[in-house]
Amino acid sequence: MYTSTEGIIFRQVKAAGGRRMLLLFTKKYGKISVGTSLTEKGRNKTALAIRPFTYGNYELYKGRDYYNLNGAEVIRSFFRIGEDVDKYMESSFVLELTEKLVPDELPQPGLFALLTDFLAAMEKREKRHKTLVLAYEVKALSIVGSFPVLDRCACCGGNENLRYFSVRDGGMVCEKCRNPANDTLIYETKFDIVNILKYFSKTPMKGFEKIALDEDAAEELQTVLREYLSYYLDIGRLKSDSILREIF
């Protein structure tokens, strides 16, 4: 069966016989593995569409248990991301994270739209790209149904003295419920994490083009979110995250 779908390439590897295997995040089919003999060399519409950070339309042959890419064309190329090392590394992390969040062959229209919005905003952003990535992580948690409890204690349900964020308990906890005190997955918040997370979850991605968190707040929020993502979504330490920590 021949079909077509919009999509974004997560990654590709070379296979035997000059073929390539693409991991493609599609709007219609979700995450799928696609074989192709097409190459990204050259300047034709197909070559451009199978390069990183490109939003394209992909012509597929769908067999019983496989997909083959017959042709592709660019809808929008976010090529400027590849011209900036910081943008490239942060965007690579987002692609890898999304790959881990998306199950095989199950459409995820919310995440697909969020990813295209993120790439558009990242391409325009001039500096302090971490805030944009944090916004993506917060929004992704909301879409997949793993958003933390913020307005009450995740343990007792009270709404007073919510000074701590507990990864293990799934959100804010009060002084009384902070147990044990030496739990490395409990963070005493040194900034208004509740309102920041709420703002990030509700504000459209394009609204973050010129918004930036204080560096210290961004670092702390990043630590909390990465632990939370790892704990609840079983994604482990991402390769791109490890490289980012080494470089920056």
Image (spheres, rainbow, N blue to C red):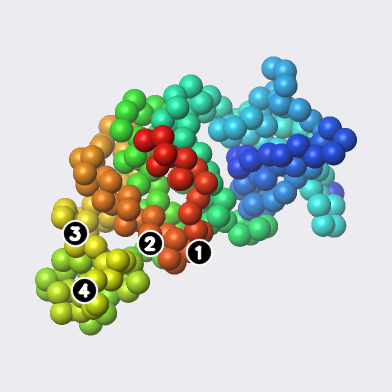
Whether label 1 touches label 2, CB < 8 Å: no
Q: Label 1: which residue?
A: 234
Contact, mark 3 vs mark 4 (Cβ under 8 Å): no
Q: Which mark is residue 189?
A: 3
> Is disc 4 placed on a helix, strand or loop?
loop
Query: Is residue 214 among the parts visible in the rendering?
Result: yes
Which residue is identified by label 2? Answer: 228
Marks 3 and 4 sit apart, C-alpha to C-alpha, by 14 Å
Q: Residue at x 62, y 46 (%)?
A: 25
Q: Which is more N-terminal, label 4 or label 3?
A: 4
Q: Looking at the image, which residue is at 32% across and 28% down?
A: 127
- Amino acid under label 1? Asp
In this figure, which residue is indicated by the disc labeled 4?
181
Q: Residues within 10 Å of mark 1 (few under 14, many from 20)?
A: few
| First-in-chain label (3 vs 1) | 3
Q: CA distance from mark 3 to mark 2?
A: 14 Å
Structural distance between the alpha carbons of marks 3 and 1: 24 Å
Q: Nearer the viewer, mark 4 or mark 1?
A: 4
Is disc 1 placed on a helix, strand or loop? loop
- Measure the C-alpha gap from mark 4 to mark 1: 25 Å
Name the N-terminal-most of marks 2 and 4: 4
Q: Which sits in the foreground, 113 or 40?
A: 40
